[in-house]
Amino acid sequence: MAMEIGDFQVQSVMFGTLTLDGGAMFGVVPKVLWEKSIPADERNRITLATRGLVVRGSGLTIVVDTGSGDKGSEKFNDIYGINARRPDLVLQEMGIAPQEVTHVVLSHLHFDHCGGSTIIKDDTVVPTFPNAKYLVQKKQYEHANHPTPRDRASFMPANYEPLQAAGQLQLVNGHIQIAHGLSLIISNGHTTGQQLLRVHGRDRDLIFMADLVPTMSHLPVPYVMSYDMLPVTTMQEKDFLLSEAVKRGHILVFEHDPYHAAAVITKNKRAYTVKELVDV
């Protein structure tokens, strides 16, 4: 069910699930702690959502992240336990034609966030949304094209090179305003140039947390992923943004939480925790 935030209707949307190593998802946190909230399978993998967001208003239809997509090989899908749906088909079920999408905001270019940005049509990889501008931070795009050995496997050119070839990739710099009431927050701990969409409300905002806080189980500041390029930076960014969220009662959307889409948070003496679940 969509909710109203400022001038926009906002609705979370499920593009599928994947499974990732539980230890990698929680870094130095012992398994005896993290498995209480998200249990692992026999391969030590935990199930994660690939959740996106649809934002409509002011003549715009915006999709935030696109899941893993359906272009992966059988081996790839088995390794990562991918169960994905094409975002254009999901939106059609919501009554939104692919041609109506004006913008796609990609938090970053890891495969589980942008894989659905392109599809195979007549044996050619093309943009999923033919009329959309795909917004990516310039620094993230540059990093994706020159990754380190540590994160090379997370980037797959077929997910974003066709966007550039079609003239639909729009590279942006920093904390920009997409439109009145819509802005981007930059977070560099997970990967250079990760961008979080912020929908400004009259009394509180809604923030799509992407991989800064992938699940509700990652609310404690030290709970950061081994995938993060700069884990200490992630912790600093988390603490700053979560502190503001507590003070202003912001709604936080968790892209990878397997159970709940969003929440308002609070802070006790030990950690940030969920105050109230929110249906988005």
Image (spheres, rainbow, N blue to C red):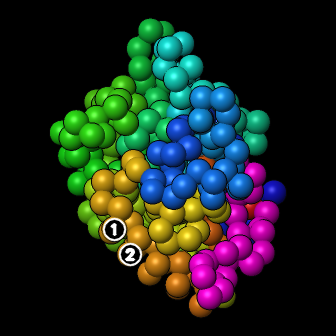
What kind of element bears circle 2? helix
Q: Which of these two is toward me, 150 or 43?
A: 43
What kind of element bears circle 1? helix
Question: Type of residue at label 1?
Answer: Val
Question: Type of residue at label 2?
Answer: Gln
Label 1, on which residue? 232
As drawn, 224 above or below 267: above
x, y (%) of residue 46?
63, 40
Q: Quadrant of residue 194?
A: bottom left
The answer to whether residue 179 shows anywhere in this view is: no
Q: Is 95 included in the stretch rendered in magenta?
A: no
Q: For the point 56% across and 19% down, which residue is it?
A: 78
Residue most extreme to the top: 123
The magenta segment = 258-279
Q: For the point 51% across and 46% down, which residue is it?
A: 23
Label 2, on which residue? 236
x, y (%) of residue 90?
69, 35
Quarter of the picture containing the C terminus is bottom right
Query: Left of 276 or right of it: where is 130?
Result: left
The numbered dot on residue 263 is none
Quarter of the picture containing the N terminus is bottom right
x, y (%) of residue 7?
64, 73
The answer to whether residue 41 shows anywhere in this view is: yes
Q: For the point 63% across and 54% down, which residue is it?
A: 32
**Do labels 1 and 2 touch, CB within 8 Å?**
yes
Query: Distance of mark 1 from mark 2, alpha carbons?
Result: 6 Å
Query: Left of 177 or right of it: where is 219?
Result: right
Q: For the point 54% across and 55% down, which residue is it?
A: 30
Please rate how many residues cluster around mark 1, counting C-alpha atoms within 10 Å: few if below 14, some from 14 to 19, many from 20.
some
